[in-house]
Image (tube, helix red, strand yellow):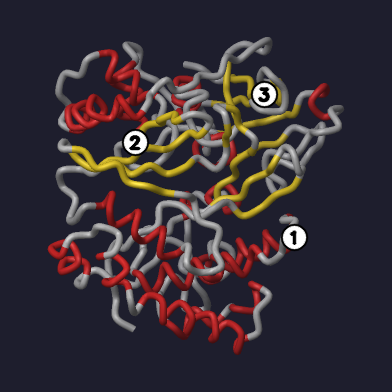
Amino acid sequence: MTSKAYVFIDGLEDKPIPCGVTLVDEDTKIGRFRYGKRYLNRPDAFPLDPIHLPLSDREYSTPFNKGVFGTLSDAGADSWGEKVILSLHSTTPKNRLEFLLAGSGMGVGALVFSLSSASSKPKYSKNTLGDIPMLLRAKDAILADKEVPDEAKKAFEFGASMGGARPKTIIQEGDVSYLAKFNRPDDLYNVVNVENATMRMLGELPCNVANTKVIHTPSGDVLLVERFDIYKGKPHSHFLSANSIFSMNKVSNASMCTEYTYGYLAEFIMKYVSEPADAYDLYYRMVFNVLMGNTDDHSRNHAMLYNFTHGHWRLSPAYDVLPINHSRQHGIGIGDDGRVGSLENLISQSKRFGLKPFKARRMVDEVKELVSEWAIYFRNHNVGEGDIARLKHVIPLF
C-alpha cells in the first residue's frame, strides 16, 4: 500500500515542478507534508493552503481526510471519479493516496502527483465536441455498471478527479477546456438545462460565474462549463476548496454558526484575497442559493484560486449552482441560526462580509426581485414546462 507521494505544480513552468512530499501513516491515519527546499527558494513560491500549509521548511501533519491534506484532496476523485478509476484500473487503489495517484493530472487545479521525485507527466484530454455521442452512450453504461469499451472509459478518465457524483469529463474546443456534464436517468428534471439557466441567472447579479452553454443532441443534452483554472490545456491557477479551508472531520451544530460557514469564507477573503469586494460576491451567492433552494452548496462547491501570473488569491467563479429542494437546510452555515435558509439568518452575520445590515437587506431585496422571475428566465433558457412545474415544488417561496 502506497504511503508516500511527491507533489508537483503544473503551470509555473513548461513542465510540472516539484513542490513537496506527502506521507500517510496507514495505522494512525495521520498525514504529513513538507515543502521542498528548492521550491521554497523560488521567487514565485506560494502556499498550497495559507492556513494549514503556509510556506515554511517545517513538517506539517493532519488527521483530516484520513491523512490527506485538503488542498491535495481537492485534486482527487469524488464518487463519480472513483467509479471511473475503478473501471479503468486492474489494480484497485487501496487508500486515498493511491486514488490521488491514479487520477493525477485529471482534476481541477494545478497539482499532480507521482511516486517519483524526478518527474510527473501531466495528462491532457483529447476529447472534442465530435466525441459527445460516444460519451453519452458510455456514461449510461458506466452508471449501469455495464461493459464499456476501453476507448470510452479513457474518454471519461479526464473528468475522474473533478469531484462530485454526476457523470462528467473534459472536452477541448480550441484553446478553451470545458467540463462536460451529463444528465442521469434518475434525475427529477433536465439538470443540464436547469443548471445552465440557474448559472446564467446568477450572472445577472454582481457575481463572477463560470461561463456555460448547452449542446443539444438527439441522444441527450450536455452542459459545457468553461474551465476557469486552465487555458490552452495548461493550468494558470491553483485551486483551494472551502472544504480544505475548513478542514474539519466532524461538523457540529455550533460550527455551523461559526467556522463552517459562508461568514468564515468571507473572513478568509478579507485576510488573504487581493480583492475584498469578493466578500460581497460571496454574499450575493449565499442569498441566491437560499432563495433558489440550492441546498447542495456544500464546502466543495466553493473555492479560492491562486493565479500564477498575478500572484494572488481570488474567489473562484461560481459553479454547481441549481435548485435542489425547499428544505432550507444548507450545506454550510448561513448565520446565527446555523444552516437554516431564512431571511433573518441571511442578515444575522452580514458584518462578517464587511456589510452593514441595511446594505445586506438591499442586496437581499435585489436578489429576491431577480428570483421572483425565475420561471420566465428558465423558459427563455430552454427549460421545458414540465420541468418548470416540477421546480415549483423545489424552489422555496419567500
User: Distance from label 2 to label 3 (Cα)?
Assistant: 29 Å
Q: On the rendered structure, is 330 left or right of 108?
A: left
Between circles 1 and 3, the one closer to the viewer is: 1
**Circle 3 residue:** 21
Placement of 165 over or under 93, stated as above or below:
below
At mark 3, the secondary structure is strand
At mark 1, the secondary structure is helix
Q: Amino acid at mark 2?
A: Lys
Q: Position of residue 91 (x, y in %)?
A: 35, 12
Q: In the rendered image, is residue 107 in sight?
A: yes
Kindly indicate whether the residue at mark 1 contacts the one at mark 2 (C-beta within 8 angstroms): no
**Circle 2 residue:** 168
N-terminal of the pair, mark 2 or mark 1, is 2
Q: Position of residue 17 (x, y in %)?
A: 70, 21
Q: Position of residue 350 (x, y in %)?
A: 60, 78
Hey, which quadrant is residue 358 in on the image?
A: bottom right
**Within 10 angstroms of label 3, few (less than 14), some, or many (20 or more) residues?**
many
Placement of 251 over or under 184, stated as above or below:
below
Q: Amino acid at mark 1?
A: Lys
Q: At 41% from the left edge and 49% from the top edge, which residue is drawn?
A: 212
Kindly indicate whether the residue at mark 3 contacts the one at mark 2 (C-beta within 8 angstroms): no
Q: At 20% from the left edge and 19% from the top edge, which residue is drawn?
A: 148
